[in-house]
Image (cartoon, grey):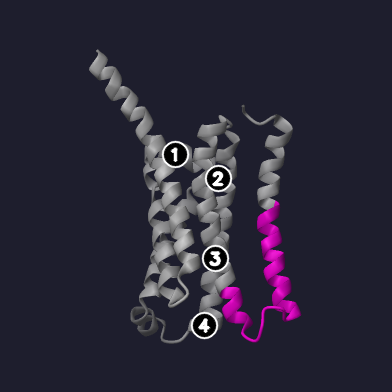
């Protein structure tokens, strides 16, 4: 059963509130000194992980729409995607400011594969954020869906980015990888369903 209007209106508000609250927690932790002796490292990692988690949540919206029949999940998906890009931008800026530095970027960039993976994931998110408005969707027409398949590449490469940094502590990233595989599998099954139905009808015909 599709959610009622009252609940439908509260879901986007809750998602937006969660994103703002996460920003508040990170900011307050920095100001209060609760993030430890190396706040730059902790905040950079927290921002990147928040962006990755929001990307995973974005992938879950289409299956939720299919299971509940409520089209509002697509609005939530757009909002979550923009929050993911917002946190990714902050993650990149924090990484440059606190860890990598602004001098001799190219030499450092090419020596660390995980930075290349992170840059690829970020660059994939840029066109998705730029074309997120409904007006862009209308202008691009059928090309909009093709372009937004970049989210699969973005989230996959982002996972590799974090995995390469995990070193010996791989448990968390393995769990995220399993979750990503499940989400991609559910979406693939959902997309294959209509195709299978058409093939069965063609056989019957």
Q: Earlier along the polypeptide chain: callout 4 or callout 3?
A: 3
Dot 1 and dot 2 residues touching (CB under 8 Å):
no
Residue 55: x, y in percent? 51, 55
Q: Earlier along the polypeptide chain: callout 1 or callout 4?
A: 4
How far, Cα to Cα, is label 4 from label 2?
A: 31 Å
How far, Cα to Cα, is label 1 from label 3?
A: 33 Å
How far, Cα to Cα, is label 1 from label 2?
A: 20 Å
Q: Earlier along the polypeptide chain: callout 2 or callout 3?
A: 3
Residue 77: x, y in percent? 55, 45
Number of the front mark, 4 or 3: 3
Q: Left or right? Give the position of 55 relative to 124.
A: right
Residue at the front extreme? Answer: 171
Residue 14: x, y in percent? 70, 48
* Residue 77 marker: 2
| Residues in magenta, as a range | 17-44
Q: Earlier along the polypeptide chain: callout 4 or callout 2?
A: 2
* Residue under label 1: 139
* Residue under label 3: 49
Look at 41% across and 52% down and name the residue there. Answer: 181
Look at 52% across and 77% down and name the residue there. Answer: 95
Crowd class of label 4 (few under 14; some 14 to 19; many from 20; radius 10 Å): few
Position of residue 66 relative to residue 179, above or below, is above
């Amino acid at each position: 059963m599709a959610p009622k209007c009252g609940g439908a209106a509260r879901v986007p508000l809750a998602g937006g509130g969660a994103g703002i609250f996460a920003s508040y927690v990170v900011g307050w932790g920095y100001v209060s000194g609760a993030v430890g002796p190396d706040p730059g490292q902790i905040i950079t990692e927290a921002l990147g992980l928040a962006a990755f988690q929001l990307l995973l949540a974005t992938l879950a919206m289409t299956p939720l729409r299919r299971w509940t029949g409520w089209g509002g999940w697509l609005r939530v998906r757009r909002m979550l995607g923009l929050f993911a890009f917002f946190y990714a931008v902050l993650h990149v800026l924090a990484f440059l400011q606190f860890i990598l530095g602004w001098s001799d970027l190219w030499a450092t960039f090419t020596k660390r594969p995980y930075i290349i993976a992170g840059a690829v994931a970020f660059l994939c998110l840029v066109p998705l954020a730029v074309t997120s408005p409904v007006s862009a969707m209308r202008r691009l027409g059928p090309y909009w869906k093709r372009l937004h398949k970049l989210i699969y590449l973005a989230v996959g490469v982002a996972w590799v980015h974090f995995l390469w940094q995990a070193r010996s502590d791989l448990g968390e990233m393995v769990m995220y990888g399993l979750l990503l595989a499940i989400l991609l599998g559910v979406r693939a099954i959902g997309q294959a369903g209509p195709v299978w139905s058409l093939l069965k009808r063609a056989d019957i015909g």
